[in-house]
Amino acid sequence: MLSKKKLILISVILLVLVSLFCYGENASYKHTIMRFSGTPGQTQNYNWKSMVNQQILYLKNIVNSQYIKEDRKNSINIQIEQLQYYINHNINPITPTSAKFTIDFMDQAIYLFLPLLIIILAGDVVSGEFSSKTIKVLLTRSVPRWKILLSKYIGVLILSCIVVVESALMCVIISSFVFHSGGWNEPMATGFKVIGDKLDSSNVIRIYQWQYAILVYSLGWFVSINIATLSFMVSVIVRNTVTSVGIMLATLIGGGFLQIFLQDWPMIKYLFAVNLDLTQYLTASYQPVSGMSLSFSTLVLCLWSIVALVISFIVFQKQDVLV
Amino acid sequence: MYKKAKFTVLFIIAFIFAIVFAAGFAYSITITNASSSSSKVTNKGSEDKAVDTKIKKLDSNSYNILVMGDSLGRGTGDETNNGFANDFSKLWKNKTKKNIEVTNIAVNGDVSSGLLNIVKSKQTLQYIQDSNMIFISIGGNEIKNFKNSSTASAAVQTDSLKTVENRYMKNLSDVFKLIRSRNENSVIVFIGLYNPFGNELTQDKLEVLNEWNYKTDQLVSSDDNGVYVPTYDLFKYNSGNYLAADNFHPNSAGYEAISKRMFEALKNYKK
């Protein structure tokens, strides 16, 4: 019953935020167009097509040059294809499309906002029972304790999956409504890899925006089940909802701070809060601490989750319930 | 009953999406982790081979024009993608019975040191040997940085400008020496610099540009078969018509104007 109310709360938060972001993006787009065209009101009048054509010519020149390395050609070709897509579909490159918005939303949400929603959801699954003293009723049933905990855990997993799906749906629906352009079939490049301080683009592949969106939301899903597991553990250990949510929030936000202050400390990369920003690995935009990769972050998060699960089951089996 | 059905639906949705997400997640790991080492090794091997074996000779039955230098030589900004070299070859068509072949090895954004490196390569030297005409455009990328560096103190600036200029002159004379070591007769046409910034350029910067052009002119003209083609005057009052959308490179009309001037200079050149 409680989780239903919380789902509604999360839906409302998502609805308000996504609408706000959409509105903001649209407003800033109109502002940019106005600056380009000089006169207010005429949105389609500035000549982006010739600019894009120029860029395509320029990139083609680079590709045809004999002094360019083979592995760079691949990513430039994808760039050309992307620009060509804009021309063919008459989409201005700076137009916000719902595909871009949906991806950007998860890009930004994955390390703070999404975990926050999950913590709201999972922070009091067990501790809530203690707070409201319903745990006594639950434990007097002739069901083994681990079964009770497992069912609760599965419930948390289902709910976090629903939250990710819901945020994707909200983004898609609201942004298509506001922007009027999908752009789901726009080609884009991914598969960059950072080796040392160099960007290795020899394995760059071309995928469509909708495929990329699925990848990004998959990463979001992975992050959210890990966060769910961790908050689950905390809510088993702590018998007070506020404390449980507080601890999770503090570690989450504190982890982000630590990343700024302790950049040179190598142990920092084993902290779960530092490993949440998984989508950056798809674009290889930056490396928080050298030596981190998607598989590394995945391993670290999995390890944290497994340990958390083991702890929560052991604690729940052994703890005395005196209410 | 109703509540149970709702739960089942929720469960199924979550389950399906969990599978989709897990698949997407696995895929993300594979694409960010694709072992690049194997493909890289093969790449490198083929590159080395390419350097050894692929020294291409130009067809001696055609009239060969070689273009070297920066984006101007490339034809950046030209909507028709011709550049001055192809525009020129159209004009030159009646002057020769042979078929005109344009070989363009210009590199966007290149500076004189880059040009020198390219000229040193075996492939380029082979091209030079086989060419009837050589067009060079260089220097624009070296001097354009001085437009925005007004914040630095004047003394420091002129000082560093001097070093840049000296290096440029040294590189350019080396390029000429290298060309002449392989090909003594063909004409070398050097395209001078214009001012794409119009009135934005202050008077002292303009003087720098003019001096730069003058010194280049002297160096090119010291070669028996070197021709310096000025473009400064062409663009002075025509920058509105001759510049492309980026306000830096010429557009097709600009390139055509340059090629006409080159043709004018070479009209009575025979060979």
Image: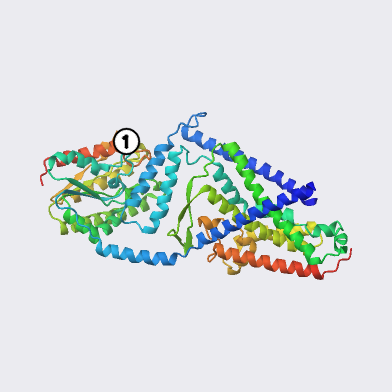
Image label count? 1
Q: Mark 1 is on which residue type? A: Ser
The image's colouring method is rainbow
Q: Name the residue under label 1.
A: B239
Q: Which residue lies furthest to the front in this view?
A: B1
Is residue A263 visible in the rendered structure shown here? no
Q: Which residue is drawn at 81% across and 71% down?
A: A318
Few, some or many residues within 10 Å of mark 1 (<14, 14–19, 20+): many
Image coords of residue B129 (percent x, y): 17, 56
Direction from residue B35 to residue A121 in the image, left or right:
right
In-front residue for pair A31/A270 = A270
In-front residue for pair B160/A167 = A167
Against A314, residue A165 (above or below) is: above
Image coords of residue B86 (percent x, y): 24, 43
- The image quadrant of residue A180 is top right
Secondary element at image label 1: helix
Image coords of residue B170 (percent x, y): 24, 57
Q: Which chain contains the residue that carries disc 1?
A: B
Direction from residue B17 to residue B267 in the image, left or right:
left
Direction from residue B221 to residue B73 in the image, left or right:
right
Q: Which residue is drawn at 67% across and 51% down?
A: B13
- The image quadrant of residue A203 is bottom left
Image coords of residue A111 (percent x, y): 62, 55
Is residue A13 visible in the rendered structure shown here? yes
Against B194, residue B117 (above or below) is: below
